[in-house]
Amino acid sequence: MPDAAAVRRSVAAVWRIESARIVAGLTRMTGDFAFAEDLAQDALAAALEQWPAEGVPRHPGAWLTAVAKRRAIDQWRRRERQDARVAVIAHDLEEEQRLAVDADPSDPDEIHDDMLRLVFIACHPVLAREARVALTLRVVGGLTSEEIARMFLQPVATVQQRIVRAKKQLAGVPFEVPPREEFDERLGGVLGVLYLVFTEGHTATAGDDWMRPELSFEAVRLARVLVGLAPREPEVHALLALMELTAARFPARLGADGEPVLLAEQDRRRWDRAAIRRGRASLARAQEIAGDRGLGPYALQAAIAEQHDLATSVEATDWARIVAAYDGLAALAPSPVIELNRAVAVSMAEGPAAGLAIVDGLAGEKRLAVTHLLPSVRGELLARLGRDEEAHAEFERAAGLARNARERAVLLAKAAATGGRRPADA
């Protein structure tokens, strides 16, 4: 008898990795996004019931897809319609199962356009921006309503209602990439959502793991597909560049036990040089296409990431160039988070006092009041100024606001280093 707890963990892991792909495939098959997600959920319930007794199948994603397709056929049969479609799909299913018996597990690097179609559907203009983002993060990113609510500092019930309404609004929407004349209308939303999925993988908003790299790499893969669909859009190349240049540092961001390794302590020899080359090439392509129009927000962020990747150490980083990029970004897409990041860059270029003055100017920002970001940065700058007692208080405050266990541990360690309690005492 398989270990029930281990099987439940396997079910959760498989669902986290495969659910978006399964829903995308089912949406293509049924032409109904909401129906597809219901079918996928039914398959998940079947797995939770059967796998503890029978064990995890060799190809769990294929198993879930097959079960979901059978449920679709059953429902269509019950409705006594679409008989011809049932016959075709049933034949296809039998053929897929026959071929899948000896098939290798799916290649995570293989491009599936179904996923990108799903993102475009979720970013449909009939939906409000907030609904587009929430739905995409739920379906493509695999995030729970609670995680999405924490990311946007909103009540869970609000997010849940938003997702339910969005699915109803999308009933009957064709499962396809929009025609060229509608492309621009949706492209900005798609780029924004892909970047949110990437950043959630880069630094998880909650949970026990600091990173969820599978999310980031899925966003990178989709961005590559998007480059093929929109090769003349500079910000598409720029987003891919930003992701590649940031993901290049992933191999050095975690210690042996999964603990965070911050930029200053990272072994830069472990950075992915191939990813850096790809990122720089994408950024150069974005700059070439943009020409006299200048760099957009993603290109400016990619330029910042490029400077970090090129530096041999924190001290050798061209901070003045990074500050200039942040100045451009703040003018183009102002936000308190960008201003906070600019403060860090200014502190490295001009000293911690200059950075602290910017940070103190953000004290009244409501969007920063409930996150650990502001006290965390303020604590760093105070520590560099030798104001340990104030730094300690800020790190403690930041730790109290952090939702991610690994991030909280880092902040408590910094609090301890500035003369407070040890992390174990907290």
Image (spheres, rainbow, N blue to C red):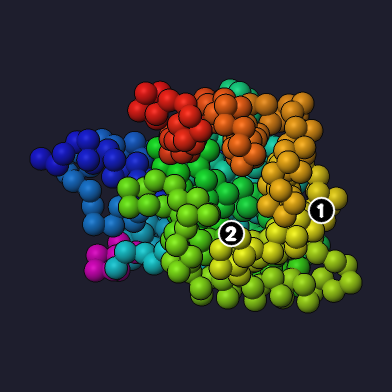
**Distance between the alpha carbons at the discs numbered 2 and 1:** 20 Å
Q: List the residue tagged with mark 2.
A: 314
Q: Residues within 10 Å of mark 2 (few under 14, many from 20)?
A: some
Residue 102 within the magenta-colored segment of the rendering:
yes
> Whole-percent x and y of residue 340?
71, 42
Q: Tag 1, which secondary structure?
A: helix
Q: Percent position (x, y) of residue 251?
A: 43, 61
Residue 293 appears in the rendering? yes
Q: For the view shown, which residue lies furthest in the front direction?
A: 386
Q: Is residue 65 left or right of residue 332?
A: left
Residue mark closest to the camera, 2 vs 1: 2
Relative horizontal placement of residue 21, taking residue 13 as reference (left or right): right
Q: Which residue is mark 1?
A: 327
Task: Give the residue displayed 79% in from the left and 58% down from the top.
Answer: 324
Q: The C terminus appears in which quarter of the rendering?
A: top left
**Does residue 268 appear to the left or right of 100 in the view shown?**
right
Q: Residue at x 39, y 29 (%)?
A: 422
Q: Which residues are magenta?
A: 96-103
Observer-nearest of 224 and 279: 279
Question: How many discs appear?
Answer: 2
Amino acid at the residue labelled 1: Asp
Local secondary structure at mark 2: loop
